[in-house]
Image (cartoon, helix red, strand yellow):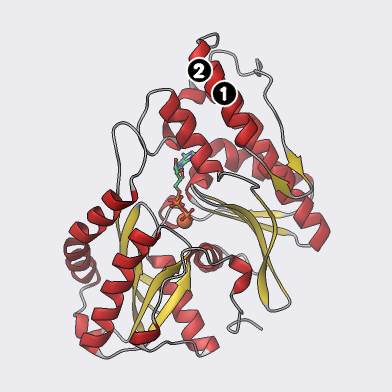
Amino acid sequence: MALLVLGIESTAHTFGVAILRGRDVLANVRRPYVTQKGGMVPVKVAQHHEEEYEGAMREALGKACVRLEDIRLIAYSNAPGLGHALRIGAAAAKSLALRIGVPLVPVNHAIAHLEVAALVTRARDPVLLYCSGANTQVIAYDAGRYRVFGETLDVGVGNFLDTLARNMGMGFPGGPAIERLALDAPRKDALVPLPYAVKGMDVSFAGLETRLKRMVEDGTHDARDLAFSAQEHVFAMLVEAAERAMAHLGKSELALGGGVACNRRLQEMCRIMCEERGATLFCPANEFLVDNAAMIAWAGLLMHEKGGIAVAVEDATIRPYERTDEVEVTWRQ
Ligand code: ATP
Ligand code: FE2
C-alpha cells in the first residue's frame, strides 16, 4: 500500500495539515488567518497558527481515519515566507518526527504549488503562472531546476489587490472583494487608464498601486470601475509574461497556482491566450490553488521517494528568503 504522508503548511496566513496516501488526498485541512479590516501582522499570524495547530491536527487525522503512528513521512514548508509563521510549522513538524520516528522533508512552498498542479491536473511539463499574495512568478523546469523566467519587480499581485482593497476600506484577503466589485462594474467596456508595466517577462505593480491609491483618495471614480480596470490591467500583464515564457521555451501547457489564480477573470484570460496559441490550460480546484498542506505533503513525498531527500531533526531549518531556483531538483528526470 502507498505511503501515508503528513504535510504541514505555515509560510504565511494559512496554517494547514494534510494527509495523503500516495496520490490520494485523505484530508486537507486549512485554517486561514482573516481580518475584517486591515492586513496581516506577522506576530499575530504566528499566534493564530499556534492556536490552530492542535485542532487542525485532530481534524486531519479524523478525516483521514488514520492514527498519528501510521504516518511514515512528514513534510513541512520551510521556505519562503514569514519567519514568524514558518517557525511554528517547522517546530510542529520536528516534534512530530521525533515522536513517531519518521523521516522529515523540508519543502519549498513555490515548488509545492507547481508539483500539486501536476498531481491534480494532467499537466506534464507546464509553465506555471504562480500568482499569490507575496509571490508572482513565471516558473518552468529546465536543466535540473525550476527556473524563474519572469517575476514581479516589487510587490506580489495578491498583495497589490489586498492593498487596493485595504485602501478602499475592506479587510484581508482583498482579492475576492476586488473580484466581486469588478463583477458589479456598470460598464465593462469603460477602462480607466492605468500604468501597464511589463519588462521582458517581469512585471511591476508599484506604480499602479500608487496611482490607484490617489484615485481612491480623490474619490473621482466609482470603486467598481477601479476594481474592474485594476484587474484588467494586472491580469493582462500576467498573461503577457506567461505567454512570452511559453513561446520562448516552446512549452504548450500552462498551469495556474497561488490564491489569485482563483479569480475567474484571470482564468478566463489565460484560457483565451492558451486557445489562441494551441496550448492547454490546467487549473487545479481552488482548494489546491490557495495555500494548502496537501501540496506540501505531495511535494515532500515526491522529493523523498524519487530524490532520496530527508533531513535530520537538528538540520530541519527554515529559509524565509529561499528562491525557487536555489533548490536542486533531484526528483525529476
Ligand atoms: P505565497 O506564500 O505563495 O505567496 P500567499 O500566502 O499569498 O501565498 P495564497 O493563498 O496563495 O497565499 O494567496 C492569497 C492571495 O490570493 C491573497 O492576496 C488574496 O487576496 C488572493 N486571492 C484569493 N482569492 C482571490 C480571488 N478570487 N481573486 C483575486 N485574488 C484572490
Ligand atoms: Fe502560496
Total number of numbered discs in the rendering:
2
Q: Residue at x 51, y 44 (%)?
A: 260
Q: Which mark is residue 216?
A: 2
Question: Looking at numbered disc 1 in the image, what kind of residue is underneath it?
Answer: Leu
- Residue placed furthest toward the top: 220
Label 1 secondary element: helix
Residue 90 in the image, given as x and y percentages of width and height:
33, 72
Q: Residue at x 62, y 65 (%)?
A: 123
Residue 207 visible here = yes
- Lateral position of residue 127 relative to residue 262, left or right: right
Residue 137 in the image, given as x and y percentages of width and height:
62, 54
Q: Residue at x 34, y 54 (%)?
A: 14
- Location of residue 162 (image quadrant): top left
Q: 269 or 233: nearer the eye?
A: 233
Question: Looking at numbered disc 2 in the image, what kind of residue is underneath it?
Answer: Val
In the picture of the structure, the residue carrying the numbered disc 1 is 212
- Lateral position of residue 88 relative to residue 325, left or right: left
C-alpha gap between disc 2 and disc 1: 6 Å
The answer to whether mark 2 and mark 1 are in CB contact below 8 A is yes
